Image (tube, rainbow, N blue to C red):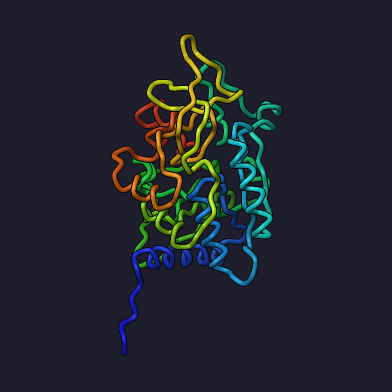
């Protein structure tokens, strides 16, 4: 008899699908947090495979800041239609209008931190008890502390010092009333794993991820897209650059990289040689040494 061999990517895929199925078996109202970025797109693809030929048995939740790239929203709507899945949109603008959050002002203003309140309100309104996300441990040091099943208290807060052991693929989803979990099925994947899987599975992505010409502003060594949400500082100039994005977030805070990589093969080659993390160009992560961890403790993704 020949030996049965699973490739590295197939092992990661099997682990992620197992976790997604485990979530559906343990929780009453799961959902998938969908940003429109490559990791959440891969997660949606894995969910499709996990339950095929049935439809994905939970909704996709998108927290819309109002400052998204148009390409992201267009892709989101096309994918939702293709999957035949329910989409729930939580609006940061509605949270501002209701007085739940206050809009930041100034040239470096961002709605990124405001997402947390909108997310927690949306989860509470829908009574979601398990929210799956595409975060990976290699992205950022705070995310490296996460378990697959990340417990959140009744206020949606995360305590990095009080996490449950996960031995032999046994996941503890027990919780008190009002608490919920964040689940990260692709925690063990790297950026390279994600790109190689996208190529292997022929997964479609927003055009942002591929090299293109864009009007940009270079601020504090970060290349930001020109947009109505980004007021110019004195002395700043708009310039046309050939760029692509490694991560997908709000227009005023998501940095691009100079790149001619317009195919998956070239992107994989580029990722293999880069020395900067994919979130190294995110302006929101540069606000402080513990910026991501502070947001996560408050209930961020």
**Quadrant of residue 9 in the image?**
bottom left
x 59%, y 54%: residue: 31
Which residue is depicted at the point 55% across and 52% down? Answer: 131
Residue drawn at 48 percent across, 50 percent down: 39
Point out the residue furthest to the bottom here: 1
Residue 47 point in image, percent of width and height: 55, 62
Q: Please tell me in which quadrant of the rendered image residue 69 appears.
A: top right
Q: Nearer the viewer, residue 144 or 261?
A: 261
Image coordinates of residue 93 in percent, x first then y, are 67, 30
- Depth check: give the residue in front, 194 or 235: 235
Vertical position of residue 257 compared to residue 261: above or below: above
Residue 1, percent across and down? 31, 90
Q: Is residue 294 among the parts visible in the rendering?
A: no
Left or right for 87, reference 267: right
User: Which residue ends up furthest to the top in the rendered image?
Assistant: 234
**How many marks are shown on the rendered structure?**
0
């Amino acid at each position: 008899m020949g030996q049965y061999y699973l490739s590295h990517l197939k092992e990661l895929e099997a682990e992620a699908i197992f976790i997604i199925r485990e979530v559906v078996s343990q929780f009453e109202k799961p959902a998938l947090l969908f940003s429109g970025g490559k990791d959440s797109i891969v997660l949606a693809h894995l969910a499709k495979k996990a339950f095929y030929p049935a439809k994905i048995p939970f909704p996709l939740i998108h927290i819309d800041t109002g400052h998204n790239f148009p390409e992201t929203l267009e892709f989101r709507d096309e994918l939702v239609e293709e999957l035949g899945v329910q989409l729930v949109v939580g609006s940061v603008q509605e949270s501002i209008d209701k007085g739940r959050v206050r809009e930041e002002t100034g040239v470096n203003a961002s709605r990124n931190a405001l997402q947390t309140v909108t997310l927690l309100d949306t989860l509470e309104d829908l009574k979601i008890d398990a929210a799956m996300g595409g975060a990976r441990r290699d992205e950022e040091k705070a995310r490296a502390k996460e378990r697959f099943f990340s417990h959140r208290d009744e206020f949606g807060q995360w305590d990095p010092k009080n996490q449950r052991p996960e031995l032999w693929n046994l996941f503890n989803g027990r919780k008190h009333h009002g608490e919920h979990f964040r689940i990260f099925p692709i925690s063990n994947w790297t950026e390279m794993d994600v790109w190689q899987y996208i190529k292997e599975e022929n997964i479609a992505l927003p055009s942002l991820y591929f090299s293109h010409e864009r009007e940009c502003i270079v601020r504090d060594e970060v290349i930001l897209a020109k947009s109505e949400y980004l007021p110019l500082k004195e002395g700043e100039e708009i310039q046309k650059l050939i760029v692509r994005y490694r991560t997908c977030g709000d227009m005023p805070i998501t940095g691009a990289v100079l790149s001619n990589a317009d195919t998956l093969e070239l992107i994989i080659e580029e990722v293999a040689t880069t020395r900067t993390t994919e979130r190294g160009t995110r302006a929101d992560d540069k606000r402080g040494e513990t910026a991501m961890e502070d947001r996560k403790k408050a209930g961020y993704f």
